[in-house]
């Protein structure tokens, strides 16, 4: 008599999912220093999308906020109580925030399920993070949440910069260093959002990123010898980081620049979709042909090689490349 519980067999031709599902709606992770205007930015972006009849799915991950100025679909405060965590475990503010995020992580698979179920009803998923950026970006819970999103949805990181504070060259450099560390930690599409453009036009920051001489002149005006030398050296190091970095200038108070930001977000989503499709096609080709050498040649023709050796090894490799006459 056949058993009522049988294990389904998976055929060899069945495709396994690789990377995020590019058909899913994208997720936007909003990060930034304390006071940069992350929550106000999410509020303005939510209102902007509602006005265009493309409402977002909004998730609040800040357990310490007393009031959220936008409609929330999932709120961490409904799962864990920040003040009760402080009282029960005898923790300070930052320790309590990290503990709340750790507790939220134990149920984040349910959050992913909710996002998937409601995917037909929203245009994008917005995630507002705690004001203390280090509590999220450098904690295990923050990594789990980020990786869970990135493995299931096309995910974009938006790093919010306070334009008014960034007028100081050393503060600007601190922000760029933090942005660089988050970019290489998450390895996700990255957009730097210069907020509060109604107070200070962030054109100075864009010029500093494009022209080292302008940044050097601003450092000389600041007249702080030790920090000047350090910031000048770091600026040269970050020159490669600035290349290809997407930036937008917005004002969360007035709504200025959100049209431009929407265009940048679309470009990032398209890049993520193309990347996922390329990986999928290459894996499919490998499964069909079963020829590793052909796949390696195909990859080398489409992807720039990353050199890991020294200068001499690199010169030897360059000499082997056939030159067109």
Image: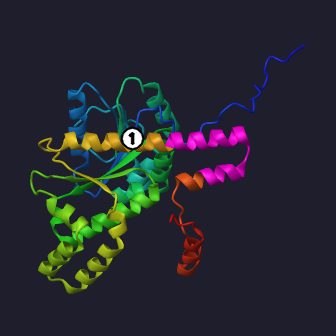
Q: Position of residue 191 (x, y in %)?
A: 32, 51
Q: Which of 22 and 49 is in front in this view?
A: 22
Question: From what the image shows, is residue 42 above or below residue 182?
Answer: above
- In the rendered image, is residue 27 in sight? yes
Circle 1 sits on which residue? 269
Q: Where is residue 283 in the image (x, y as percent from the top left)?
A: 63, 42
Q: Residue furthest bottom?
A: 225
Image quadrant holding the N terminus, namely top right
Specify whether residue 294 is painted magenta: yes
Q: Residue furthest top?
A: 1
Specify whether residue 232 is painted magenta: no
Q: Which of 179 and 133 is in front in this view?
A: 179
- In the rendered image, is residue 95 in sight? no
Q: What stretch is highlighted in magenta?
A: 276-298
Helix, strand or loop status at disc 1: helix
Q: Position of residue 151 (x, y in %)?
A: 52, 43
Q: Which residue lies furthest to the front in this view?
A: 325
Q: Position of residue 181 (x, y in %)?
A: 40, 63
Q: Is residue 66 left or right of residue 295?
A: left
Mark 1 crowdedness (10 Å alpha carbons): few <14, some 14-19, many ≥20: many
Numbered disc total: 1
Indicate how the structure is coloured in the image.
rainbow
Q: Which of 133 and 24 is in front in this view?
A: 24
Question: From what the image shows, is residue 73 above or below residue 134?
Answer: above
Q: Residue at x 49, y 55 (%)?
A: 140
Q: Quadrant of residue 175?
A: bottom left
Q: Which residue is drawn at 40% across and 59% down?
A: 182
Q: In which quarter of the image is residue 253?
A: top left
Dominant SS type (magenta): helix
Q: Residue at x 74, y 43 (%)?
A: 290
Q: Which residue lies furthest to the right in this view?
A: 1
Q: Residue at x 51, y 59 (%)?
A: 304
């Amino acid at each position: 008599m056949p058993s009522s519980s049988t294990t389904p067999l998976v055929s060899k031709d069945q495709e396994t999912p690789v990377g995020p599902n590019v058909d899913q709606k994208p997720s936007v992770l909003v990060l930034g220093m304390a006071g940069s205007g992350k929550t106000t930015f999410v509020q303005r972006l939510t209102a902007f999308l509602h006005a265009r009849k493309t409402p977002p799915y909004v998730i609040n991950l800040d357990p310490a906020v007393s009031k959220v100025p936008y409609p929330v679909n999932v709120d961490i405060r409904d799962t864990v109580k920040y003040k009760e965590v402080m009282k029960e475990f005898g923790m300070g503010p930052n320790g309590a925030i990290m503990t709340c995020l750790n507790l939220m992580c134990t149920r984040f698979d349910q959050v992913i399920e909710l996002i998937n179920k409601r995917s037909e009803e929203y245009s994008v998923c917005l995630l507002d993070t705690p004001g203390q950026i280090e509590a999220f970006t450098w904690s295990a819970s923050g990594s789990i949440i980020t990786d869970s999103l990135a493995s299931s949805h096309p995910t974009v990181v938006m790093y919010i910069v306070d334009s008014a504070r960034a007028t100081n060259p050393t503060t600007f450099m601190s922000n760029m260093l933090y942005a660089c560390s988050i970019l290489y930690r998450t390895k996700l599409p990255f957009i730097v959002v210069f907020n509060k453009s109604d107070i200070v036009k962030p054109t100075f920051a864009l010029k500093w990123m494009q022209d080292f001489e302008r940044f050097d002149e601003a450092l000389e005006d600041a007249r702080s010898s030790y920090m000047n030398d350090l910031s000048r050296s770091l600026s040269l190091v970050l020159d490669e980081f600035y290349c290809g970095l997407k930036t937008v200038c917005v004002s969360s108070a007035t709504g200025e620049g959100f049209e431009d930001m929407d265009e940048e977000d679309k470009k990032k989503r398209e890049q993520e979709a193309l990347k996922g499709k390329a990986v999928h096609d290459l894996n499919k080709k490998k499964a069909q042909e079963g020829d590793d050498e052909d796949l390696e040649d195909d990859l080398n023709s489409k992807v720039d090689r990353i050199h890991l050796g020294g200068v001499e090894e690199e010169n030897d490799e360059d000499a082997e490349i056939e030159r067109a006459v």
